[in-house]
Image: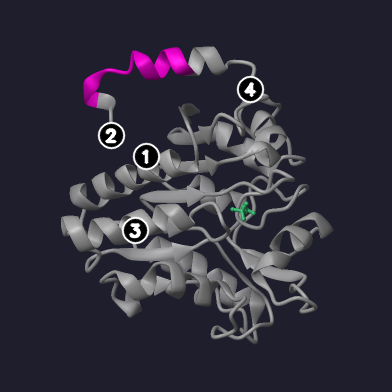
């Protein structure tokens, strides 16, 4: 996969936002795959700025989020729908009907997950998918041992993920143990992926994902099979990569027509 090394999360967010802007300008009816967590927040902030100051228009855009907690209402402050409204949806001109997240309160998990897959297909497939990475190497909520061919379904979170996500819930409030998440197979169907990772805590997951063996122990390593994934990584998250100098060289010598 392509690796872009950036100074810090702020530069990473600007870089990722340029990919989004270029995608939307190229195809105003783009289908975007969105992620939650702390990593994409500065990216969304930059997209909002581009919307306000550079007329970046979301009116034709459709979005699909990677995942949602199971068993909590969409207006719960810990829900991913709430998160997305707060960090992006309420600030750009996305049509509410074009915005999709799995329904954490569905009565029929299996058919709802199949419908989510069908909706993505009907929308023409995801053009650009942004991904964070868990400390355990998860993408979406595909925890280690997830099938590398998986589709949208219900998953049980690991304790590591529950602990990492406690920050988004009130003290003493339980993080749901179950989630609905796009599968790794769903993610691999996207035409382009952007994997974002910033900070030391992500260094070992990134080393495995980018340079390690293809393994269900690190679900993000499945991106090695994807034909068009760009990892945007800061110095700390890149600190365990063996080929750092090579990635730098590739970036420096990237032909002008390939630059975003
Ligand atoms: P984070 O989570 O952005 O909050 O670090 C990433 C993830 O779990 O995918």
Asked if the residue under mark 1 is in contact with the one under mark 2, i.e. CB atoms within 8 Å, the reply is yes
For label 2, the residue is 260
Q: Which residue is mark 3?
A: 31
Camera-side residue of 118 and 7: 7
**At 50% from the left edge and 70% from the top edge, which residue is drawn?**
116
Q: Magenta part of the protein: which range?
A: 248-257
> Going by the image, does 24 lie left or right of 1?
left
How far is mark 4 from mark 2, CA to CA?
24 Å
User: Can you tell me whether the CB of the residue at mark 1 lies under 8 Å from the nearest atom of ligand 1?
Assistant: no
Q: Residue 70's quadrant in the figure?
A: bottom right
Gap in angstroms between the C-alphas marked 2 and 3: 18 Å
Mark 3 near ligand 1 (CB under 8 Å)? no
Q: Quadrant of the C terminus?
A: top left
Which disc number belongs to residue 15? 1
Between disc 1 and disc 3, whose residue precedes?
A: 1
Q: CA distance from mark 4 to mark 3?
A: 32 Å
Callout 2: SS: loop
Q: Secondary structure at mark 1?
A: helix
Query: Reading the chain from its start, which is encountered first: label 4 or label 1?
Result: 1
Please tell me whether residue 252 belongs to the stretch shown in magenta: yes
Secondary structure under the numbered disc 4 in the rendered image: loop
What is the chief secondary structure element of the magenta stretch? helix
């Amino acid at each position: 996969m392509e690796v872009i090394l950036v100074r810090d999360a702020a530069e990473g967010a600007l870089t990722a936002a340029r990919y989004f802007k270029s995608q939307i300008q190229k195809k105003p009816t783009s289908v975007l795959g969105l992620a939650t967590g702390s990593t994409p927040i500065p990216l969304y902030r930059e997209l909002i700025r581009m919307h306000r100051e550079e007329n970046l228009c979301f009116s034709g855009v459709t979005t699909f989020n990677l995942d949602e907690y199971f068993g909590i209402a969409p207006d719960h402050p810990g829900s991913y729908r709430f998160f997305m409204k707060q960090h992006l949806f309420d600030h750009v001109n996305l049509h509410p009907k074009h915005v999709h997240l799995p329904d954490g309160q569905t009565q029929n998990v299996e058919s709802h997950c199949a419908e989510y897959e069908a909706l993505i297909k009907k929308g023409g497939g995801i053009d650009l998918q942004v991904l964070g990475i868990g400390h355990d190497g998860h993408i979406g909520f595909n925890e280690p041992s997830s099938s590398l061919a998986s589709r949208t379904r219900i998953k049980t979170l690991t304790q590591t993920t529950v602990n990492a996500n406690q920050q988004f819930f009130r003290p003493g409030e339980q993080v749901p143990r179950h989630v609905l998440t796009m599968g790794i197979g769903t993610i691999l169907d996207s035409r382009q992926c952007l994997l974002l990772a910033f900070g030391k805590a992500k260094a070992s997951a990134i080393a495995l994902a980018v340079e390690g063996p293809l393994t269900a122990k690190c679900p993000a390593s499945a991106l090695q099979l994807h034909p068009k994934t760009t990892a945007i990584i800061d110095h700390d998250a890149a600190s365990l990569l063996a080929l750092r100098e090579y990635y730098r060289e590739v970036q420096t010598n990237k032909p002008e027509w390939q630059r975003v």
